[in-house]
Amino acid sequence: MRSTLFPLAATLAVQALVAMAVVTVPVLAPELAGATGLPAGYIGIFIAVVYAASMAASLVSGTLIQRYGARPVALSGRASTLHPLIAETMRAGLPGDCPFTLRPCQGHHAAARLALAAATA
């Protein structure tokens, strides 16, 4: 029982935080529209991309976990970039032969560039 409690609680916490992050953007859409000059209706594109990516990740996650294990798949979700202590804890929990390298990712910059290109096209 104890061995399943922590993973279950961690999964629930991650899902709750992601759900809050996703629904925050539509709530702020009217203010964001005023500040950026973009129509508030573009929020539908954001929601569509989030849900499409979620569905695609769900389709392959089982296979990835069976092949590589749960920990490496969780590490690939970029949670390690939230705080240095998270990265160190993840690194300490991995077997010695499993490499752990943090690479900078500017995904939000790429998303902003795509949104700007779509808005100005």
Image (cartoon, grey):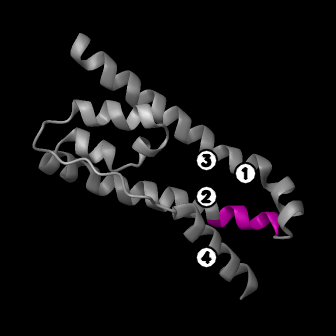
Task: Determine whether, in the image, residue 91 is placed left or right of residue 31.
Answer: left
Q: Which mark is residue 47?
A: 2
In the rendered view, does 41 fall on the left or right side of 104?
Answer: right
Q: Quadrant of the C terminus?
A: bottom right
Disc number at residue 114?
4
Residue that carries the numbered disc 1 in the rendered image: 26
- Please tell me whether mark 2 or mark 4 is closer to you in this view: 4
Query: Which image quadrant for residue 35?
Result: bottom right
Q: CA distance from mark 1 to mark 2?
A: 8 Å
* Residue at the image point whose x is 45% and y is 45% from the top: 81
Which tag is nearer the camera, tag 3 or tag 4?
A: 4
Q: Is residue 51 magenta?
A: no
- Secondary structure under tag 1 reads helix
Which of the two discs, 3 and 4, labels the residue nearer the N terminus?
3
Residue plotted at (37% across, 57% down):
103
N-terminal of the pair, mark 4 or mark 1, is 1
* Residue beneath the point at 46% across and 34% down: 14
- Residue at disc 3, secondary structure: helix
Seen in the picture, residue 64 relative to 13 is either above or below; the reply is below
Which class describes the residues within 10 Å of circle 4: few (<14), some (14-19), or many (20+)?
few
**Which secondary structure type mostly characterizes the magenta part of the structure?**
helix
Whichever of labels 2 and 4 marks the residue nearer the N terminus, that label is 2
Labels 3 & 2 near each other (Cβ < 8 A) = yes
User: Which one is earlier in the sequence, the residue at label 3 or at label 2?
Assistant: 3
**Of helix, strand and loop, which one carries label 2?**
helix
- Indicate the amino acid at tag 4: Leu
Q: Looking at the picture, does residue 108 appear above or below residue 100?
A: below
Residue ID for mark 3: 22
Give the residue type that dot 3 points to. Val
Judging depth in this view, the residue of 80 and 60 nearest the camera is 80
